[in-house]
C-alpha cells in the first residue's frame, strides 16, 4: 500500500477553503442587489417612524410617496440644484470621506466626534399636497462604543421635535442600546430646539434631573446607567442643530420657504 503524502491533508484543506471562499463570494455578489433594496426600505421606514407616519399594514414605498428628498448645502443652508447630483443616489458618508465633498473638522468644532463632515446633507420634506408639514434630518455622532445614527423629525415651525428614530449603533444592550427603545424615543416628542432668542437650548440630560416646567421644554431625559452614550446623544444634537449643522438651512427655509 502506497504511503500517503504528508502534505495531502494540507492540500485538501486548502482546496476546501478556496471552494468555500468562492461560494461565499458568489453569494455576496448575488445577494447584493437584495441587500441594497432592503437597506433602502429600512432607511425609509426609519424616516417614516421619526415622522410618526409609519403604518405596518401599508407599503413603505406608498407611505414614502408624500416625502420629498432634497439636498442642502450645510454652509449656505440653501437647496442644492446640481443636475449632476441625484439625491436618491447620494451617500453622505462617502461624501464626507471624499476630498471634493467632505472636510476635516477641528477638535473644537467636532463635538459630535465624527471627524469629517459632508458638504451636502439629505433632508426629507413631509408634505400634504403643497403644504409643508415637517422635515426629517439625518444626524450622527459618537457614543460610548460606536457611532450612533438617527433621524430627527422637526415640525413646520422648524423648532418643535415631532419624533426621532435611532436606527444603527453598537452601544451596550440594556444601557446605551436603549436608544432604540420606543418608550425613550417618545420622550423626544414636542421638545423645543431653540429658545425665544433663537439660541440653541435643547439638551439631553441625566435621567431624573430636576428642572422647572420651562426648562423641561428644552430637556430630553437621558438613558439611565448610560452616561457616556447620553452625553454623546447630547453632543450630536448640539452639533447638528447648531451653526455647523442645520441651523443655516432653517434660517434660509424661514426666509425663502421651499423656493431655491
Image: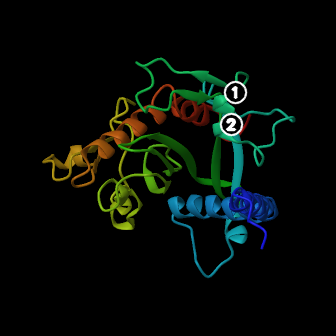
Callout 1 secondary element: loop
Residue at 30 percent of width and 40 percent of height:
231
Which residue is painted at 37% across and 64% down in the image? 181
- Relative to residue 197, is residue 162 drawn left or right? right
Q: Residue furthest front?
A: 1
**x and y, in percent, of residue 232 in the image:** 36, 40
- Nearest the camera: 241 or 104? 104
The residue lying toward the viewer, choosing from 256 and 204, is 204
User: Which labelled disc corresponds to residue 98?
Assistant: 1
Which residue is at the far left?
Answer: 210
Whether residue 218 is visible: no
Residue 199 at least partly seen: yes
Corner quadrant of residue 193: top left
Q: Callout 1: few (<14), some (14-19), or many (20+) C-alpha neighbours within 10 Å?
A: some
Label at residue 94: 2
Instruction: Give the number of marks.
Output: 2
Residue 29 is left or right of residue 177, and the answer is right
The answer to which quarter of the image holds residue 228 is: top left
Q: Residues under labels 1 and 2: Cα distance?
A: 6 Å
Q: If the image is split into quadrants, where does the C terminus sit? A: top right
Residue 252: image x %, image y %?
60, 31
Determine the residue positioned at 77% across, 74% down.
1
Return the residue nearer the eye: 12 or 134: 12
Circles 1, 2 touching at the beta carbon (< 8 Å): yes
* Secondary structure found at label 2: helix
Amino acid at each position: 500500500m502506497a504511503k500517503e503524502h504528508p502534505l495531502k491533508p494540507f492540500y485538501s484543506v486548502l482546496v476546501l477553503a478556496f471552494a468555500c471562499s468562492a461560494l461565499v463570494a458568489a453569494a455576496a455578489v448575488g445577494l447584493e442587489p437584495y441587500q441594497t433594496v432592503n437597506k433602502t426600505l429600512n432607511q425609509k421606514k426609519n424616516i417614516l417612524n421619526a415622522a410618526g407616519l409609519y403604518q405596518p399594514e401599508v407599503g413603505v414605498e406608498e407611505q414614502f410617496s408624500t416625502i420629498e428628498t432634497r439636498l442642502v448645502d450645510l454652509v449656505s443652508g440653501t437647496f442644492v440644484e446640481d443636475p449632476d447630483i441625484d439625491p436618491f443616489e447620494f451617500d453622505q458618508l462617502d461624501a464626507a470621506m471624499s476630498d471634493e465633498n467632505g472636510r476635516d473638522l477641528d477638535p473644537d468644532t467636532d463635538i459630535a466626534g465624527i471627524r469629517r463632515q459632508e458638504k451636502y446633507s439629505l433632508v426629507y420634506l413631509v408634505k400634504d399636497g403643497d403644504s409643508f408639514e415637517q422635515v426629517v434630518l439625518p444626524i450622527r455622532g459618537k457614543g460610548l462604543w460606536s457611532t450612533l445614527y438617527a433621524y430627527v423629525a422637526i415640525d413646520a415651525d422648524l423648532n418643535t421635535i415631532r419624533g426621532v428614530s435611532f436606527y444603527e449603533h453598537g452601544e451596550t444592550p440594556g444601557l446605551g442600546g436603549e436608544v432604540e427603545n420606543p418608550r425613550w424615543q417618545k420622550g423626544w416628542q414636542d421638545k423645543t430646539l431653540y429658545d425665544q432668542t433663537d439660541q440653541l437650548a435643547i439638551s439631553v440630560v441625566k435621567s431624573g434631573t430636576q428642572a422647572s416646567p420651562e426648562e423641561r421644554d428644552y430637556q430630553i431625559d437621558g438613558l439611565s446607567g448610560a452616561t457616556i452614550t447620553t452625553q454623546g446623544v447630547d453632543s450630536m444634537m448640539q452639533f447638528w442643530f447648531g451653526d455647523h449643522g442645520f441651523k443655516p438651512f432653517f434660517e434660509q427655509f424661514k426666509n425663502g420657504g421651499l423656493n431655491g
